[in-house]
Image (cartoon, helix red, strand yellow):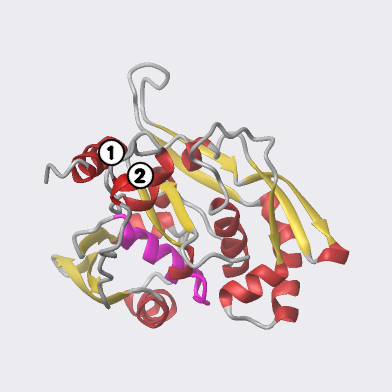
Amino acid sequence: MIQDRQLIVKSNHIIEASYRLSVAEQRVILSAISQVRRDKPVTDEVMYSVTASDLAQLCGTDPKTAYRDLQNAAERLQTRRVSLVLEPDGITIRSKRRRVTCWVQTVDYIDQEGRIEMRFGKDILPYLTGLQREFTRYALSDVAKMTSAYGIRLYELLAQWPEGHREVALDDLRRWLQLEDRYPSIKDLKRRVLDPAVEQINEHSPLKLTWSQRKTGRKVTHLVFDYSPKSTARPSKNADTKTKRSKLSDDDIAKQARPGETWEAARSRLTQLSLGLT
């Protein structure tokens, strides 16, 4: 059964990684990420199941379309790569390096059931489970109905910054989206990438988004995004006080942390809230 608040939790290294996935492939990857447990150790032997019926329900698409998309995604996902920038940590990594790895190591397609089973790659899994540092979280339903792959990626970049304002260097955005030399003029980029992505975010996500461009000299070098929630949900007054004051699990923190907030900062803030110290 699809849950309304299935959570996507990703390391910010993944949010700002360089990769390109189709909409169907992103839906499959995100559906699997929403199943990753963060309250217990997870190995790369765990299989995650995604069905065409679940995708149809989640995305509001025709079941036949979801079946076809799932089959196509299963055929391509194993070859998809993601490029990560690893920062020096002074112990295992002494200097900045770029790592190219796979999203998944195996994908099994069960034709009669309209279902795939997939196993995340060993190198990618720590960025989905071992989130000791900066991470971004949002509800799967925020992007489920988007039909623009760029819209999904842009939404994640905005969710990473909760302040409602983000300025992105154009060169960085091109690298993250693997645009390479495509759409070299800002006019083409606006028509092919930015306008469709912004339209999708405004139509399907909880955010209202506008954007502008900033020049350095005569050249457009940065994009400026301003956004705010369409509505703010208030916490229930009938919350269980005993549960609120109980020890926070990692899953509790993942669900209640603010986008872009470090794991340690989220734990400290939520602990203080549970004890009535703020």
- Residue 186 percent location from the top left of the image: 32, 74
Marks 1 and 2 in Cβ contact (< 8 Å): yes
Question: Which residue is tagged 2?
Answer: 253
- Residues shaded magenta: 143-160
Q: Residue at x 49, y 68 (%)?
A: 4
Of the pair 188 and 7, the residue shown nearer to us: 7
Percent across and percent down for residue 56 are 65, 75
**In the displayed structure image, the side of residue 103 where residue 158 appears, left or right:** left
Does residue 238 sit above or below 196 in this rendering?
above
Circle on res. 196: none
Tell me: 129 left or right of 161: right
In front here: 85 or 151? Answer: 151
Question: For residue 235, what is the image quadrant?
Answer: bottom left
Q: Mark 1, residues whose alpha carbon is within 10 Å: few (<14), some, or many (≥20)?
A: many
Image quarter of residue 26? bottom right
Under tag 2, what secondary structure? helix
Q: Quadrant of residue 37?
A: top right
- Please tell me whether residue 156 belongs to the stretch shown in magenta: yes
Residue 256 or residue 160, whichever sits in front:
256
Task: Say which element carries label 1.
Answer: helix
Residue for point 69% across, 63% down: 73
Check disc 1 and give the amino acid type: Arg
Question: How far from the left and from the top, in percent, is residue 243?
Answer: 35, 46
Numbered label attached to residue 267 = 1
Q: Main secondary structure of the magenta part?
A: helix
